[in-house]
Image (cartoon, rainbow, N blue to C red):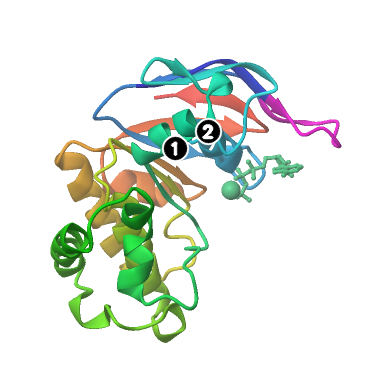
Amino acid sequence: MLTYFKASKIYPHRKVFALRNISLTIEQGEMVYMLGPTGSGKTTLLELAYRAQVPSFGQVTFMGKNLKHLSPAGVSAIRRQIGVIFQDYRLVPYRTSFENASLPLEVQGYSDKSIKKRLESIFSWLALENKRDLFPAELSGGEQQRVAIARAIASEPILLLADEPTANLDRETAHGIMSVLSTLHQRGMSIVFATHNEELTRKNPGRIIKLREGRIVSEG
Ligand SMILES: Nc1ncnc2c1ncn2[C@@H]1O[C@H](COP(=O)(O)OP(=O)(O)OP(=O)(O)O)[C@@H](O)[C@H]1O
Ligand SMILES: [Mg+2]
């Protein structure tokens, strides 16, 4: 479903490659860990997948479409199929947790009624029912991350990109988030999970791809 073909990324004002000659195919239904130290290119790799960046050389395709040549409508269409969880949550401070999670559905034109229906079941699954009217500043880190997960999965994406989603959480909370992702994977969602933490990759089975200095150094 997601393919990198000799993809490289060089940021214009820097001489170094953030990614170098990445060839990689992620199949539907896979759980893939991108494991690498800070600066190895994990975030850049995910950004290429949801078209936040385009490769300097090579190609990235999603569901057979080359992401480089997309109209704005084409970009919106692929982003509807891809959910993204950011390390720093990126919740809107003046929206409640429920309003934050509903944002992508609002943008996609869902009715208030269907948004409510979808989110209520997701909020209950994530044990967020009694947090729905709170603002991000009133939530713990683990709760904010669960709201970010609710937002990412609300539109039932076929691919979920998770960028260090547990990096700022304590061990127990991190394992709770991992088991949520594991359940989503068991239900058929493809997940790409970027992390520097090898321990997390041992908790739930998946393919482990190791990145160093922008290159794939091992592909499990
Ligand atoms: N917008 C940017 N402009 C210039 N250089 C960048 C930019 N984003 C990333 N880089 C560089 O590209 C390389 C890879 O960065 P990237 O953020 O993809 O790594 P990472 O593996 O996600 O690191 P971390 O674990 O710290 O999040 C780094 O050397 C970084 O400095
Ligand atoms: Mg990163």
Q: Disc 2 beta carbon < 8 A from ligand 1?
A: no
- Taking depth in this image into account, of 111 and 133 the one nearest to the observer is 111
Dividing the picture into quarters, in which one does residue 185 lie? top left
Q: Is 165 positioned to the left or the right of 105 in the image?
A: right
Span highlighted in magenta in the image: 9-19
The three-letter code of the residue at mark 2 reads Pro
Quarter of the image where one finds residue 44: top right
Circle on res. 72? 2
Q: Quadrant of the image for the C terminus?
A: top left
Q: Is residue 43 above or below residue 72?
A: below
Give above or below for 15 relative to 90: above
Residue 180 is situated, as x and y percent measured from the top left of the image, at: 23, 56
Q: Which residue is drawn at 37% across and 77% down?
A: 96
Q: Read off the residue under disc 1.
A: 76
Identify the residue shown where x is 37% and y is 53%: 104
Q: Where is residue 145 in the image (x, y as percent from the top left)?
A: 38, 65
